[in-house]
Image (cartoon, grey):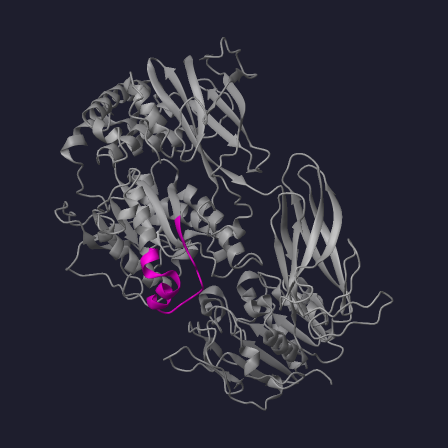
Amino acid sequence: MKNRSPQRKVRHPFARFLSLLCLLVLVTAPRAQEPSVSKQSPENRVALYQALLDLTNPWTVMCIAAHPDDEDGTSLIVMRRKYGAHTVSLFSTFGEGGQNAIGPELYEELGAIRVNETLAASKIQGSEPYFLGLNDYGFSKSADEAFKIWGHEEALRRMVLQIRKLRPDVIITNHSVTSNDHGQHQATARLTVEAFDAAADPNRFPEQLKEGLTVWQVQRLFVRAGRSSNPVPTETKPVVTIDPNERDPIRDTSFAEEALRALHEHATQGPWPKTVAQLASRFRNSTDGKLPMIRYVLSREAKGGQALPKDSHSFLDGLRLPASIAGQLVPPTIDGRPLTDRLDDNSLVFDQLAKYWKAVQASYASFVDQNQSYFNSNAGKPDDFYRYMPAIRKISRALALSAQLDFRVDPNSIVTSSSGADLSLRISNRSNQTVNFIKCFSCGEGQTCRADPPAIAWRLRGSLSQNPVAKNDRMLPGTDLVGAAKLPIPDQMAVNVPLSRHLYQPNALGFELNTSCSVEVKGALFLLSGSTRVNMAPAVEIASIKPSPLVITPQTSNKPIGLTLQIVNHEKTGIRGTIEGVFESTTPRGTNGTKIVETPLTLAPSEQRDVKVTMQAGRMEMRIGPTRTYVLPGKTAPKTEEPAAPAPPPLRGLVFRMADKSSNEARVSFVFAEARVAPNLRVGYVRGFDYSLPNALTALGVESKELTVDEIKTADLANYTSLIVDNRVYESTPGLIETNQKLLDYAQNGGTLIVFYHKSNEWNPDPKRNRPELAPYKLILGDERITDETAPITFLEPGHPLLNSPNKLGQEDFANWIQERGLYYPKEWDPQFRALLQSNDPGETPLKGGLLVADYGRGHYIYSSMVWYRELRAGVPGAYRMLANMISYGAKK
């Protein structure tokens, strides 16, 4: 981020402030409300209260977490909503290695969803989220495994960089270095401790100390107590206690309720309790529907720092600003009382803020004059600069809200390199004062923000409102000013749509656009400021290919198999182009890179369209393009009247793109699985969160049907040869537990009931949640996992029919697995169950409950805690062979 040229003279203290302010990330202004002259809306009242409270607190609290939803949202809310602290959260990963409780997306697609969930949760928390962008590779059991994948120095470098940029006074974290719950949690905790010192050390990552960035000493580091192996200390270390049940003084809710509402935004990691009372019931000794106190241990503190008082309820207690600035930022009062006490007297509050504003301006101008050598170079600014700038932003925001000025800037949500960003701006005067409008301008991230290019100077016009606008530079009470402009795409702006394909790139979250308007009210000149994000897409996006991968089995190799390409035109004009599909084969010989699809395509402005591609009988027919003959893996070319062509190498997949337009590339891989099934199968299933199970059943060529709870209640289940209860659906599908006896009766009467993994707290009998034993015999789950996807598999009963028919399984069927072997392995089961497989992570006790099977009446019951859905989705042939054996088990041969 560049400083202003030292030759450029600044004649007015406010002009100097204006130039510097536009270099910073500005807060987002509230949305415009319907005209109501001099009457404050409830939303504005809450926003003004928060802005006035923010003026009383100069400190920043950072919460560091490994994954989205690991942050302590409650404490962030308390620090912002009760104390007015600036709060930020910093995440090691995007959470892309976890499970998805609401849909089929996994990995980078899931990471993109969790980014947006985190942004939504942070709005409720009043915090700002940031990401290190480290790889979430799934659950692990040691920090060493995390550092092996992340790279210790690289992970530490990223964390130190963010601490130096965001300059938190206090860091809090849920993660402890002694925790044993998750390797990535352990690693994040260790990084946090190391970064506490490293961020203040000029010898650590000195390359960061350029372009104005400086070292930064965090004052305190707190670790949450009472979690994992981090007990609450009795006497040795100071403790901060946060009461989540306390009421928010302005929002008519408790902090716990706000935190739970934010937690609900993390929907992919749910389902969450609907009420605080339901959440409280999960804690021991909670009988009144309230949550237990949150306790944090002071783990580290800066040398020479101020001591934390005893019995503190804020992480900031006892901190004091340096004497050089403390007297300049004493928050304003009215008759010795805080401005929040006069919340409904906008005029009085504004007048007091205006006096404070002029005093801070004068103080800041004097500060700049005394430190010209810093401002005329790329050297880091004095520490007081980083206290003044947040205060200036806060005062401007409070002035705007007390003056009842609404400000909004909206860009296109998505732009292309040829379209530019169309921006609309609206300023609404809801007060009974005339507002003098000076000028507005916008600039992009990293650009010097001034009224000449590359910034945009706005030309505003009056809109229809209660009263006409007398002049373009004056806003009468109850009037609006609106404007429109187009921002040329800066050279440094790169494509970041779809987010899932750009997740780990520096520009993943888009291009930041800062907009400021200077206004004068009752002699006070200040800024209306806002920050928005612009996302850039290719002109044509191939958004998805389904199914992917495309799995071929003996039952489907001679049947039509289709692909669906979802294509999106991001241009606001119609376009014509050509869709291309080319081979990717397993060897560079022959047809690798050969174009096999070439078809014209016309798209209307902003149109989204599905394009069908059909493959059939060992050859590939592109129904939207020329027909060609190609060999699928493991098949031979059929006889055809077309001229014979040289046999191509085995097909790995296809790459699709728009040939003559800006377009992304989308790939689909092909897999041949020698997975055979018993004849005449009819499978019913209760689907989980994704489509890996129905896609796999389609690939196996069996007749299948997704069942609802009502259908299970009323249907004749004897029509199905097997039924499958997918991952975690006893938790996610309301009413299934009450209908479970119908499923057990089906098995007892001769059917095969298959149940995939569930979490222990979703499965084990629990009278409080009205959950009985779900299996026909005792089956208690633990929390044990096998996280090494290469962990050896032992066949405990190699001759058992489930492992031999119709497919004889061997070690090769457990090769090339991804992420893990299984989750929440059973720890107790009735002798009626037979354990068929055994495995374990290195150095740990073998787990035998990964695949359990029992006879039940005339039928069968199978429970498996192995992650078949991940392996089916990844196209692991052995997973298809095992699924084929499960649905064939007990069927007539």
- Left or right, 445 with respect to 461, comes to left
Comparing 870 with 344, the one in front is: 870
Which quadrant would residue 613 be assigned to in this image? bottom right
- State which region is magenta: 131-155
- Left/right placement of residue 393 relative to residue 840 reads left
Foreground of the two, 541 or 337: 541
Q: In which image quadrant can residue 422 be found?
A: top right
Residue 58 x/y as whole percent: 25, 36
- Residue depicted at x 34% and y 28%: 21
Please state the horizontal and vertical placement of residue 851, each as a whole percent of the image. Answer: 53, 80
Q: Residue at point 55% right, 66% down?
A: 730
Front one among 838 and 599:
599
Residue 121 among magenta residues:
no
Give the quarter of the figure containing the C terminus.
Answer: bottom right
Answer yes or no: is residue 662 visible: yes
Q: Name the side, left or right, on which 504 lies relative to 804.
A: left
**Above or below 654: residue 122:** above
Q: Name the quadrant containing residue 570.
A: top right
Q: Quadrant of the N terminus?
A: top left
